Image (spheres, coloured by chain):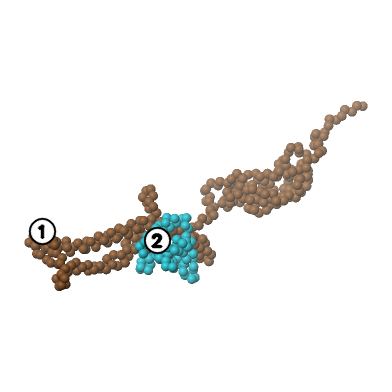
Amino acid sequence: MKHTTLTSHDQGKKSGQMMCPNCSEAIPVTFHALLVEGKLICKNPSCKTVLQLNRAQSQTAISSMKKLQAGLKEIS
Amino acid sequence: MADFDLHELLAAPILAMNEAEAQNSARYVELLEEYAFEPAKAGGIRKLSTLSFSYMRAEPDGTAQLQNVEIPLVQFLPISGVSIETAKLNYALKINPSTEKASGRLKMLGRLAETVESNTPLSGNLNIEIQLKQVDMPQGVMSLLQASSSGVREVPMPKEEPAPPVDVPVELPDKFIDFEVLEKSAKVIAPGQDYATVIRPSFVEGLKKYDAKVSLTLSSHPKGALSFEGQDKQVINDREDFKIKFLTSPRIDEYKASTKVKLLILVSAEIDGKEAAQFTHSIVLQRRISRKRPEKIITKKPRKVIK
Ligand SMILES: [Zn+2]
């Protein structure tokens, strides 16, 4: 499955990265991870921190992401 | 075809490109407004929309602690812009030097050369070649991102309330300890005998938030009905069983039937070395009511002795 990456570090920008709070490695952020799985996992094998999304406290942001995802699907 | 002021003719495509870029930027701001912020509330202040996560934070001592973190959504948004990197403008123009003078300079009039089938060098039109490039976000957005990344908030998980400072008035419930009687050495008390009972104190929530020293002082009702081993204040702890030993007075049989013998426990709480609160808990001790009437009632008027 192809996941749209939300972070934009591949475009050479300094910002827009999700850093692991434990090891500071960049964590790939996808719509799928946030909207379906509801968690982000640090890929650093010696860290593997799991950031569990608290849906109740993130409602506005989640609905924004859903809107954005629908919009991006329309374009592509 | 009409003739144009050469100045206008050259400027028009550049202006058009500038306008396109401005529109692009405006759309960019619209997108940010739409996705990155919470809806506006009274006062017009808009908060960045955030995602909240929980994770186990690795502590320096090797332990892990549950932690909340709030990350502004703008950190994740794949909104970025493009702008014109290079633009090549090729004009093939026919120039008519005009005699009109506008604002002191000679006005040049020109027209785009008509495209001729033969494709001679003179034939042509306006050719614009534009190369776009991915741009860095506008400085304002970069600053917003910078601010929002420093705005990644670690939200500590709620912990047990810390002990209030000394100057906060201590508010304890009237009865800040409950007692459960676990054992009694006998169901009823009899005069002149040793008894023991085990009680389990449990501190109520209102007391637990203070670092209180709780002590008991034992006495009885009526006074002197019971005598205790160790008369002084005795410190007790939450849910730590406590044994009370006492000796009953030989006189308890002399009390009226309606008199209840009680074990009185004066509970006092000391917080920061100061007496904070007290209350008395009483435990009624069942006694065997003698069928024999108390002496004073037994005393009869001396009979008249008739000699
Ligand atoms: Zn990590």
Residue B286 drawn at (x, y percent) = 74, 43
Residue picked out by circle 1: B102
Residue B210 drawn at (x, y percent) = 57, 51
When the figure is inspected, residue B251 is found, relative to residue B130, above or below; the finding is above
- Residue B80 in sight from this viewpoint: yes
Residue A31 badge: none
Residue picked out by circle 2: A69
- Identify which residue is drawn at 53% across, 53% down: B161
From the image, which quarter does the C terminus of chain B lie in?
A: top right
Name the residue type under label 2.
Gln
Residue B265 drawn at (x, y percent) = 67, 46
From the image, which quarter does the N terminus of chain B lie in?
A: bottom left
**Numbered-mark total:** 2
Report the residue that reaches farthest toward the right. B307
Report the residue that reaches farthest toward the front. B117
According to the rendering, which colour does chain B have?
brown
Residue B306 drawn at (x, y percent) = 91, 26
- Identify which residue is drawn at 37% across, 68% down: A10
- Identify which residue is drawn at 53% across, 56% down: B159
Asked if marks 2 and 1 fall on the same chain, the answer is no
Pick whichever, B39 or B262, lies toward us: B39
